[in-house]
Image (cartoon, helix red, strand yellow):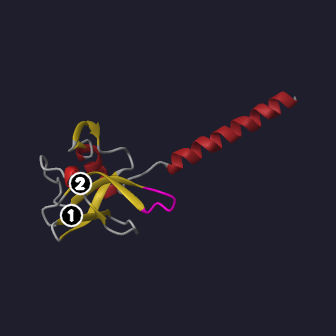
């Protein structure tokens, strides 16, 4: 009887854990899902053997060009604009929707340091 109860409790806990993991998976906004599926399969401009994007790394970006330097941040990101390294700028593709796009991730203790994997300026930038 105790073994059965332990098994049931373990099964419930496992189901709760799996559900929680799935709930934490990154979901793109509905308006960006088609772009994610078609466009975010691009490879790094400075190493065409490595993908720019994982499920949560790429998104449309706010961008600006100041003093000869591109600066960008993911749309909705509260952090500051990040300087884009020239080697990470895509020159062989056009933006599919005219917006700027960035692939990267925040690292560091407070998540303040943004590492850029790829960037493509939009035609309206």
Q: Identify whether 10 is placed above or below 39.
A: above
Dividing the image into 4 quarters, which one contains the N terminus? Answer: top right
Image: 43 above or below 33: above
Q: Residue at x 76, y 38 (%)?
A: 9
| Quarter location, residue 114 | bottom left
Q: Which mark is residue 57?
A: none
Q: In this orientation, which residue lies closer to the viewer: 32 or 87?
A: 87
Is 31 within the magenta? no
Which quadrant is home to the C terminus? bottom left
Task: Give the x, y percent position of residue 99.
Answer: 20, 61
- The residue depicted at 26 percent of the width and 41 percent of the height is 41
Q: Secondary structure at mark 1?
A: strand
**Depicted 16 relative to depicted 71: above or below:** above
Residue 75 lies, in percent from the top left, at 32, 64
As drawn, the residue found furthest toward the right would be 1
In the rendering, at what x and y percent does residue 65 appear? 18, 68
Instruction: Tell which of 54 and 88 is nearer to you.
Output: 88
Calculate the distance from the C-alpha at mark 1 to the C-alpha at mark 2: 9 Å
* Residue beneath the point at 37% across and 66% down: 76
Q: Residues within 10 Å of mark 2 (few under 14, many from 20)?
A: many
Q: Give the side of residue 15 with respect to residue 46, left or right.
A: right
Kindly identify the residue that appears in the image at 23 percent across and 54 percent down.
119
Please tell me in which quadrant of the rendered image residue 18 appears.
top right
Residues at marks 1 and 2 touching, judged by CB atoms closer than 8 Å: yes
Report x, y in % for residue 27.
Answer: 41, 52
**108 drawn magenta:** yes
Task: Name the mark on residue 119.
Answer: 2
**Residue stretch in magenta:** 107-112
Magenta stretch, main secondary structure class? loop
Q: Which residue is mark 1?
A: 70
């Amino acid at each position: 009887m105790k073994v059965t109860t332990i098994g049931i409790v373990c099964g419930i806990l496992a189901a709760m854990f799996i559900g929680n993991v799935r709930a934490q998976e990154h979901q793109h906004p509905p308006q960006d899902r088609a772009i994610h599926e078609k466009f975010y399969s691009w490879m790094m401009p400075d190493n065409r053997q490595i993908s720019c994007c994982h499920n949560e790394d790429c998104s449309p970006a706010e961008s600006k060009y100041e003093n000869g330097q591109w600066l960008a941040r993911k749309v909705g990101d509260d952090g500051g604009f990040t300087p884009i390294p020239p080697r990470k700028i895509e020159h062989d593709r056009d933006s599919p929707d005219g917006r700027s796009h960035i692939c990267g991730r925040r690292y560091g203790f407070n998540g303040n340091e943004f590492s850029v994997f790829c960037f493509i300026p939009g035609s309206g930038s």
